[in-house]
Amino acid sequence: MLEKAENSAVRTTGWPYDEQSVSSSVPDSSSPFASPTFPLEGVDSSAEIARHPSQYSSSADNNRSKRSRSKASLKMFYARYGYHGSNFEQTYRCYPASFFDKPHLEGGDKVIMPPSALDRLASLHIEYPMLFELHNGATDRISHCGVLEFVAEEGMIIMPYWMMQNMLLQEGDIVRVKNATLPKGTYVKLQPHTTDFLDISNPKAILEKTLRNFSCLTTGDSIMVAYNNKQYYIDIVEAKPASAVSIIETDCEVDFAPPLDYKEPEKPQRPIVPAGKAPAEGLYFLLSKSYYERNFVLPYC
């Protein structure tokens, strides 16, 4: 029985746990560290507690003390980086991906956040995929994004440059980041900035490939599509069922509005001729034709 119990041990690693072994085996009574919370089979627990009251009370006190110290240390950890409340909401200084040699960020809507953000999100049990609301308080611009990694320096967030342009952010500006839950998108209307995008051999395939790197779309944003060493900008004109939607694992209908620089082809206009001159010109043409045939056509033709 002991042998079977030892095989059922589970090893748990990673923050916030130190490496430890959690086992359902029967404790060794000879060990000074034996836990009294797992009595042997057939032994009356109340009788056991009555015989060793100090052992049980001290163990419970120690456990409560450890839990309180753990909670206090977590609070101090989060307070150090400005995390408060039951939601994730924090301010960072933003910098473009080009500052850190991460050009792959420009092809999507994901950002890079510091490790402390991951610790905080894990403690709040935030659902995956993690989506965030970005807010520029200086201009009151709002957008949304996903997250790619948690390797940025503390107090810093790395963003695609086109996203910073959308939010009117400069290098080192303050941006507020808050976790968000967005509905799955069912409809999106897009508007290219130039007609050049429609000249691509298969714009639909290029757009679908680009949107695979996006987590969400926000009405009013302009996303960037890179193709053949050229950048095409496309406005998000409309989104349903909300102004900001998630496009992860969803069937979304996509509609296109005419490009911003599109102009209707002009129809050729007929010259306007005064009504009194039209019959005279027509008569002159008939007379001249008759005169030509009468004077220049050979008799034998």
Image (cartoon, rainbow, N blue to C red):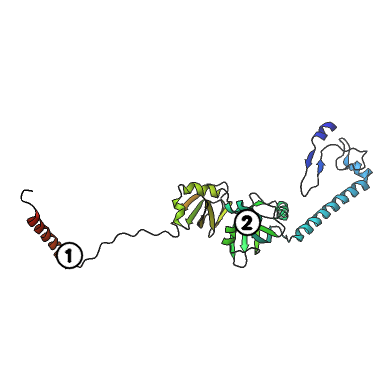
Task: Tell me residue 58's x, y (percent).
Answer: 90, 49
Task: Tell me residue 183's x, y (percent).
Answer: 57, 52
> Please, what is the three-letter code of the amino acid marked with disc 1?
Ala
Q: Is residue 141 above or below residue 4?
A: below
Please give the name of the residue rendered at 45% of the width and 54% of the height, measured from the top-left corner: 196
Task: Tell me residue 30's x, y (percent).
Answer: 93, 38
| Of residues 39 and 278, the one drawn nearer to the viewer in this rendering | 278
For mark 1, does the 10 Å Cα neighbourhood hold few (<14), some (14 to 19), or many (20 or more) residues? Answer: few
| Of residues 87 and 38, the one drawn nearer to the viewer in this rendering | 87
Label 1 residue SS: helix
Q: Mark 1–mark 2 contact, CB under 8 Å?
A: no
Q: Is residue 107 above or below residue 174?
A: above
In three-dimensional space, the C-alpha distance between marks 1 and 2, rounded to whole angstroms, equals 70 Å
Please give the name of the residue rendered at 9% of the width and 57% of the height, measured from the top-left corner: 290
| Residue 98: assigned label | 2
| The N terminus, quarter of image | top right
* Total marks in image: 2
> Please, what is the three-letter code of the amino acid marked with disc 2?
Ser
Residue that mark 1 sits on? 278
